[in-house]
Image (cartoon, helix red, strand yellow):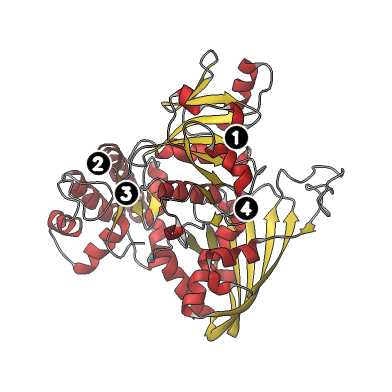
């Protein structure tokens, strides 16, 4: 390769960097002033770095087979910034691909036409709901990650306001607040918090990127009057796992200032187990207690749904290779559960999972068709579900993977199903992935009516994103999506 060619390649990279830098403030203003969330084939472009934006453009080639440059998307974003738009989610990547395929030359007219229902703030049938107070009851792994997501989304039209966290008293309040802030600020798995956290010991609050969050010390819900903190009509997100039935979770509803409760674990009894993207439409205004099911259920149900729709699932077995959790022992010690007393850091631990049965609560058509088991392995995060299925309609690897790829980029499930086609990926590559599950195309096996799928999932962060989506549903936070074919 000649020096001239090398120089041209580098100059093109610098040019793309410069355009991405110019795009960032436009995206920020659309988000904060118009509540417009810009995405790139389902991946948010809000608060992203220049390099991340360029990588997201590169991602399009892998899933769409079409080269896409920031040279293509910048004019789309610039045109959007010149229009007075109403709240919406706009996939600028898909719009750019559409514009290229049409071969047009008037990008402003194209964008105005595609977004006509929100130009000048007009919305056709979309409701953004009302601001909703959110309380995190418990501040462990899921609680802190949900806090990160809520704070990240607070700048635009999310309307969910993190107002308080509830933890047990630890004596020295100043020291306790510092430790809570430190655990939010630094995370061994997910890295440092992207922002600023300050502490007000006297007020017992954390200021997280401008969000003032009350820290409430209590040993039970009965001790708390949320209205005394200016919190009203709140949704309590119970991250403790202590109560999983209506009687236990109902304690939250007896507190002044609380209207609903969301459990971040599988619910028992008649509690609705919701997998967002699948049965979130079952949530009604009358529902006061909802379960977000489990991380594994969220990972497998969207994939099972699209497979059942296209091929029909006759029977199947779900084997979960799951990261160890805080419930296990670091070293051998007594545990009430079978095998979980053995060291999580040194052993593969065979245990049970309710995900297969729980899947039928979100997808009744799978009732009685699935079995399941789980193996806990010595890693702290990112798990895998292996779906061994018998289908009604035969297929092959290429057809099955192509169908799942299309579902991941152009369906109502694009926030739930991700797709990777690389023979080099390993579990750590999926830390921070916001999808419920990621299909590993290179591992897919299909032979007629027998199929085996490998689905990765960040059992902490991906699940936390699903929890926030349910919170939005419970709060009637709803946005139009563009282009119209976008999921």
Determine whether label 2 and label 3 are within 8 Å by CB. no
Q: Mark 4 to mark 2: distance in Å?
A: 35 Å
Q: Which residue is mark 3?
A: 38
**Nearest to N terminus: mark 4 or mark 2:** 2
Tell me which residue sits at (79%, 42%) in the image: 330
Label 1, secondary structure: give it.
loop
Compared to residue 234, the image places residue 414 above or below, namely below
Q: Which residue is mark 1?
A: 139
User: Residue 363: where, in percent of width, then height?
Assistant: 53, 68
Q: Mark 2 to mark 3: distance in Å?
A: 11 Å
Label 4, secondary structure: give it.
loop
User: Residue 275: where, in percent of width, then height?
Assistant: 51, 58
User: Residue 175: where, in percent of width, then height?
Assistant: 64, 18
**Nearest to N terminus: mark 4 or mark 3:** 3
Q: Which residue is mark 2?
A: 34
**Nearest to N terminus: mark 4 or mark 1:** 1
Q: Mark 4 to mark 1: distance in Å?
A: 20 Å
From the image, state whether disc 4 or disc 1 is nearer to you. 1
Q: Nearer the viewer, residue 117 or 90?
A: 117
């Amino acid at each position: 390769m000649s020096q001239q060619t090398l120089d041209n390649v580098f100059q093109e990279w610098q040019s793309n960097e410069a355009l991405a830098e110019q795009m960032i403030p436009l995206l920020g203003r659309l988000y904060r002033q118009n509540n417009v969330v810009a995405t790139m084939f389902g991946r948010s472009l809000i608060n992203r770095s220049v390099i991340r934006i360029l990588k997201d453009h590169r991602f399009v080639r892998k899933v769409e087979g079409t080269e896409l440059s920031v040279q293509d998307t910048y004019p789309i974003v610039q045109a959007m910034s010149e229009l007075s738009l109403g709240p919406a989610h706009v996939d600028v990547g898909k719009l750019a691909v559409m514009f290229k395929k049409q071969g047009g030359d008037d990008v402003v007219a194209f964008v105005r036409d595609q977004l006509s229902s929100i130009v000048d703030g007009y919305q056709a049938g979309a409701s953004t709901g009302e601001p909703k107070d959110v309380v995190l009851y418990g501040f462990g792994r899921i609680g802190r990650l949900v806090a990160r997501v809520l704070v990240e989304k607070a700048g635009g039209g999310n309307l969910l306001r993190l107002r308080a966290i509830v933890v047990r008293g630890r004596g020295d309040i100043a020291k306790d607040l510092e430790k809570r802030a430190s655990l939010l600020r630094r995370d061994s798995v997910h890295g440092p918090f992207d922002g600023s956290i300050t502490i007000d010991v006297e007020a017992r609050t954390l200021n997280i990127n401008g969000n003032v969050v009350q820290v409430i010390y209590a040993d039970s819900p009965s001790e708390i009057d949320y209205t005394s903190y200016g919190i009203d009509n709140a949704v309590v997100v119970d991250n403790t796992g202590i109560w999983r039935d209506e009687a236990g979770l109902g304690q939250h509803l007896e507190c002044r200032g609380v209207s609903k409760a969301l459990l971040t674990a599988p619910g028992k009894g008649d509690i609705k187990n919701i997998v967002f993207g699948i049965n979130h439409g079952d949530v009604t205004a009358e529902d006061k207690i909802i379960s977000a099911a489990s991380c594994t259920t969220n990972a497998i149900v969207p994939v099972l749904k699209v497979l059942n729709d296209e091929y029909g699932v006759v029977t199947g077995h779900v084997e979960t290779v799951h990261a160890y959790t805080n419930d296990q022992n670091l070293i051998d010690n007594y545990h009430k559960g079978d095998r979980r007393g053995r060291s999580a850091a040194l052993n593969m631990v065979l245990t049970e999972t309710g995900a297969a049965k729980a899947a039928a609560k979100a997808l009744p058509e799978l009732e009685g068709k699935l079995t399941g088991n789980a193996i806990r392995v010595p890693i702290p995060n990112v798990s895998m579900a292996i779906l061994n299925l018998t289908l009604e309609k035969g297929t092959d690897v290429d057809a099955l993977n192509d169908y799942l790829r299309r579902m991941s980029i152009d369906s109502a499930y694009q926030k739930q199903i991700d797709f990777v086609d690389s023979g080099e990926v390993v579990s750590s590559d999926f830390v921070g992935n916001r999808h419920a599950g990621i299909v590993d195309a290179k591992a897919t096996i299909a032979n007629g009516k027998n199929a085996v799928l490998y689905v990765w999932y960040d059992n902490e962060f991906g699940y936390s994103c699903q929890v926030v989506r349910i919170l939005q549903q419970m709060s009637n936070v709803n946005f139009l999506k563009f282009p119209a074919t976008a999921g």
